[in-house]
Amino acid sequence: MVIFQYFPREFDEILLLVNEEGMSFLEAERTVLDVTHPEIGWWLAETWNLPTELIDGIAHHHQPAAAENHPEIAMLVHLSDILCKMFQMGSGGMN
């Protein structure tokens, strides 16, 4: 949502890479912005002084095993992400 709202031109470039080049969102984000949405989320969560459980869940939701302090929270966010895509809830970044 942050990329979509505050970087609309870059978001369009990311979608183009995903749809036409077959890149994953993370690869496309790294290519266009040199940062990924989990990294942006981590930075915001740290800046806002959110609890470490939430920071871990946000930062590691694509790789829950990498969460050092609260992998169970990251795993729940990861599972939620998978279920939303599976049941086509939200756009998953697709228009």
Image (cartoon, helix red, strand yellow):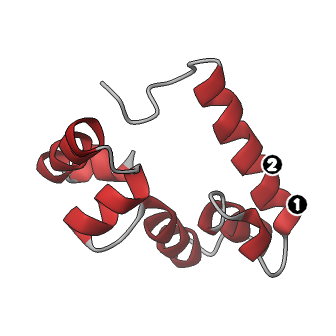
- Which amino acid type is marked by label 1? Glu
Q: Residue at x 43, y 67 (%)?
A: 40
Name the residue: 72% across, 49% down. Answer: 77
How packed mark 2 is, by other alpha carbons closer than 10 Å (few <14, some 14-19, many 20 or more), is some
> Which is more toward the observer, 59 or 83?
83
The amino acid sitting under disc 2 is Leu
| Residue carrying label 1 | 72
> In the image, what residue occupies the spot 22% across and 47% down?
17
Report the residue that reaches farthest toward the bottom. Answer: 68
Assign a secondary structure to mark 1.
helix
- Quadrant occupied by the N terminus: top left
Quarter residue 36 falls in: bottom left
In percent of width and height, residue 8 lies at 17, 45
Q: Are marks 1 and 2 in contact (CB under 8 Å)?
A: yes
Q: Position of residue 31 (x, y in %)?
A: 24, 66
> Which residue has dot 2 on it?
76
- The image quadrant that residue 95 belongs to is top left
Looking at the rendered structure, the secondary structure element under dot 2 is helix
Q: In the image as oriented, which residue stretches furthest toward the front? A: 21
